[in-house]
Amino acid sequence: MSVIAITGSGSGIGAATAARLQERGHRVLGVDIKDADIIADLSQPQGRASAVAAVLARCEGKLDGLALCAGLGVVVKPHTKIAAVNYFGVVALLDGLRAALERGSARSAVVVSSVASVQLTWEKNPIGSALEAGDEAQVAAVLAGAGDYAGNVAYAGSKNALPVAVRRRAV
């Protein structure tokens, strides 16, 4: 039986993915802010760290799959929370669980982005360099200056940065 961790398992794509994998006999470790095996707030650094630690403990350091589905939309406030979950949460779990994935037998990782990721190029992503640098304060500063568009900038910018982060780690 393979062990697969899924963020956002409490609703939406994550819940549907978890249900399908469980139906097929996989052991799923659901991670979400509520209604999950592992309760963690991925918008906070300590929540990300506790999620990684809990998954590692429950999979005993060996993970066969990882589906990073947790995400927030443009209407969530504060807008910094969008970038925190959509980018920093994904990257923290991808990096924090990588060694466990390497020990898995049928290892794979899936990261859910959005068509919004192509609304701007990486070079024009106003929060891209701050996301990549792990600078949540700089992300907040850019979003503070974005006015009514802060939610859109946070969402599209964070989703645009995900494929870049994944490609750089896939090497």
Image (cartoon, grey):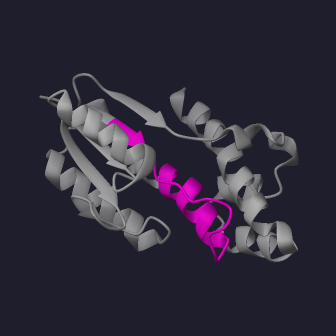
Drawn side of residue 157 relative to residue 81, left or right: right
Res 142 → quadrant: bottom right
Tag count: 0
Residue bounds of the magenta highlight: 66-91
Vertical arrangement, residue 81 with respect to residue 129, above or below: below
Could you tell me which residue is drawn at 50 percent across and 68 percent down?
43
Q: Quadrant of the C terminus?
A: top right
Q: Quadrant of the N terminus?
A: top left
Residue 99: in sight, yes or no? Answer: no
Drawn side of residue 146 relative to residue 157, left or right: right
**Which of the pair 45/156 is nearer the observer?**
156
Residue 143: in sight, yes or no? Answer: yes
Q: Specify whether residue 85 is painted magenta.
A: yes
Could you tell me which residue is drawn at 63 percent across and 36 percent down?
163
Q: Position of residue 13 (x, y in %)?
A: 44, 43
Vertical arrangement, residue 7 with respect to residue 33, above or below: above
Could you tell me which residue is drawn at 61 percent across and 64 percent down?
82
Drawn side of residue 55 relative to residue 160, left or right: left
Q: Specify whether residue 139 is painted magenta.
A: no
Res 51 → quadrant: bottom left
Vertical arrangement, residue 27 with respect to residue 90, above or below: above
Could you tell me which residue is drawn at 39 percent across and 54 percent down?
11
**Which of the pair 101/2 is nearer the observer?**
2
